[in-house]
Image (spheres, helix red, strand yellow):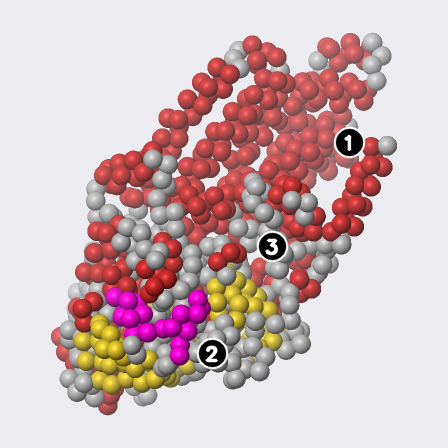
Amino acid sequence: MLRFILRRLLLALPALFGLMVLTFIMLRVLPADPSAALAGENATPEQIAAIRAAFGFDLPIWKQFLIYFGQVMRADLGTSLFTNRPVAADIALRLPATIELTFAALIFATAVGIPLGTLAAVWHNSAFDHIVRIVTVAGLAVASFWFAIILQFTFSMEFDILPLRGRLETGIDPPPFFTGLYLIDSLVSLNFTTFLNAIEHLIMPAFTLSLGGLATIARFTRAGVLDTMQKDFVSYAKAAGYPERRIIWVYVLRNSVVAATTQIGLLFGALIAGAVAVEWIYDWPGIGSYAVQAIFTSDYKAILAVTLVVGLIYAFVNLAVDVVLALLDPRVAETL
Amino acid sequence: MRRRLFVLAAAGLMAASGVAVAPAEAQRRPNEIVWGDQLPGGLDPHVIADVPMQFIQLNMYDELYRYQGNPPELVPWLASGHTVSPDGLTWTFTLRPGIKFHDGSDMTAEDVVYSFRRVLGLRRAPAAAFLPILDPSGITAVDARTVRFQLKAAYSPFLAAIPLVSIVNSRLVRANERNNDWGSAWLSSNAAGSGAYRFDPSTYRPQELVDMTRFREHFLGWSHNQRPIDVVRSRPILETTTRVNALLRGDIDATDSYLPTDMVERVSRSRGVRVARDESMRVMVLRINNRRPPLDNVHFRRCLSHAFNYMGFISGILKDYAVRNGGPIPKNLWGAPADLAGYDYNLDKARAECEQARAQGAPVTREIEIHIQTQLAQTTQAAELLQADLRRIGVNLKIVPNTWPTLTSSTARVETTPDMWVHWVSTYFVDPENWIGQMYDSQFHGTWKASSWYTNPRVDAMLREARVSTDQNRRRQLYEEASRIVVSEAADIWIYNTVQLRGLSQRVQGYQFSPVGSGGELRGVSLSN
């Protein structure tokens, strides 16, 4: 298993390098050059040229890439053109918010999607099954920014039962920093007011973000359970008199969730991408909203860093999924 | 058993928290304001010069002179006054006595010298107005309270540009300089000012959270405001709908000052909130690349100018929350000719001008591209309106989505500058030089402000004379005449002067708008119960 993990980690390196090259080229071949914006409203062409030279924007792209690559190798993601702070510091400040949101969405999608898909398969072609199928198609089709606004209007504006935006109410201080995840940090510091406030703030963004994933997981689980229920071992189990609940929730489900588990890994990338819109609407201070601002200001070092960090997380989560698959299915473990 | 344990744990948690589901306002003190407008990328006022930075400058820092009110009046601030030599080259400012920085130290002329040298040394946004006319050696402290600026060339807008530079605590910034960075890395997340509000670095999160507390020792005192705000919490909200909802819920006390029309109506209909409407100095302009055929033909440019439905846009789309502005200078600023009406919307005239252009061989059938700024809906609306009317007279306009950095960098060369693009020219210093001077003097070609690539030696001569003349009447005359010429030659399409629209809680009292800073100065603001 350890060899497998090491091999997968090594394989991730060229993928990350490719990601960096591709993103760098895509960003630098665009005509967007932040020099004019940095030089200010009243700058002369000479002043703009001086800024361009000072930041190295006038160098050939390959040279700019080599300089950047050298920096990254020294664990230096550069300085943000927009905030004038180290990009790594900005991301470190914002990444926990995105991780907390994404994991909450993933946990919700999994916790609801798997039972929903299983029940839909068990009662297939029933009214429940039809409703689940309609809801899951709608879940995949609905635009998250639209859904977010609808939730805000309903639960914040109309019923006033959930907060509108942000991670915490204004006036409540963030918990002491351990992980940057407010739920964990507030619990560790036994600050339950902050914990409950953080949960309230997380509900709508996490639910919005989870919708697409929930639909995917439910559909894959339903298909997997339906398929497994046709297998001989299920008939034998029934004939041997095992209780139906045990057959479905233990034997069938364990053999059915392999496809759904693979999807969970793939979903993580989609959720991080989806977090951009969700963070923007809910004013969630994560790397998604940071990336949008970086794009609007052509802060290319920030964009590159966000891409790299997301790529890294994606690689890590997929590795974790492979390990879980191996634990779920001993046949997978044998191939490692 | 397990379920019972869970319920007990949950109940304990709720009891310990005092049931934390408290409404937003209950968390705040009565003299605490939550400001929902944008924040700048960093906090160094010598690196960034944009509208969000003005909020930081006006509250955390002070300047030698400052703009107050609307129309903005330039008043002595840290300086008690100034003198200027007859040739306009030597400017001497005298500091008021007893000015304290937030750390309790005294402000001296050395701090002013350091601040201006720092601006020139960093060469970033606020430096642009000074680099062509000021060397670091030209800024000297005559004594502890007197600063002298020796300009390389006469520059009449110098005083108007003085408020661009916030005065920083030189000892504090110097102590945090690393690798000749002028303390820039440190000041991006800290403050070193003397302003009415003191920054709290412990809670700072870039672009997300700035907290300030009232500086009781501010040099102007607080006698003007019986109930000043003690705590300012800046919480920028990215999405407009969320921002307005937050205002309606009482989560914030103020939105940004560019509310879209539909949101203005929504806020106006709601209880406990209002919309402050103030005419600003911010001109919306459709830029025309005057060098590209057929746009190099004056008749074709006039054709475009007559094809824009000005009042349809202002009344129909903007619900009259804008004022028609027919030329490049905001009409509420001196230098804008009072009798300059600008072009009218008339498709017959447009057709006739296009015919003249065609007769002169201009390729009027070529598809014209207009670049809009994706995140600014009004730029799309203006382009679509023009597109629809041009289609009726046989001109094909293509709308191209783009972003601000891409557009500003594309204007460096005439070949890469779009046929047309849409933007606004805001107020950074209140002088016609900020608009017509930098938009139509050919020496600025290659900057986004001069992206029409307009060239007229007569206009160049007028604008250059106005830049160095110390006779205000002569300057006014020159700017008015130059305005008439660029308008007659339809260098661009000028649409309106902005009415800024800021959503405010009814409890916000004493809000005073100025085009510089858009009403973000909180010294005079108080909160009612």
Is residue B115 rendered magenta in the image?
A: yes
Depth check, mark 1 against mark 3: the one in front is: 3
In front here: B446 or B509? B509
Q: Residue at x 53, y 15 (%)?
A: A1
The disc label shown at residue B513, or none: 2
Tell me whether circle 1 and circle 3 mark residues in contact (CB < 8 Å).
no
State the residue at coordinates (78%, 31%): A126
Q: Chain of mark 3?
A: A
A192 over A15 or under it: above or below: below
Crowd class of label 3 (few under 14; some 14 to 19; many from 20; radius 10 Å):
few
Which residue is under mark 1?
Answer: A126
| Amino acid, disc 1 | Ser
In the rendered structure, find residue B11 and report the number of the disc placed on it. Answer: none
| Number of marks | 3
Q: Is residue A95 left or right of residue A246?
A: left
Image quadrant in which you'd find residue A88: top left
| Quarter assignment of residue A221 | top right
Chain ID, mark 2? B
As drawn, is A105 to the left or to the right of B399? right
- Report x, y in % for residue B63: 36, 74
Q: CA distance from mark 2 to mark 3?
A: 32 Å
- Residue A8: x, y in percent? 46, 21
Q: Is residue B375 above or below residue B74?
A: above
Q: Chain of mark 1?
A: A
| Residues in magenta, as a range | B98-117
Q: In the figure, is residue B157 to the left or right of B41?
A: left
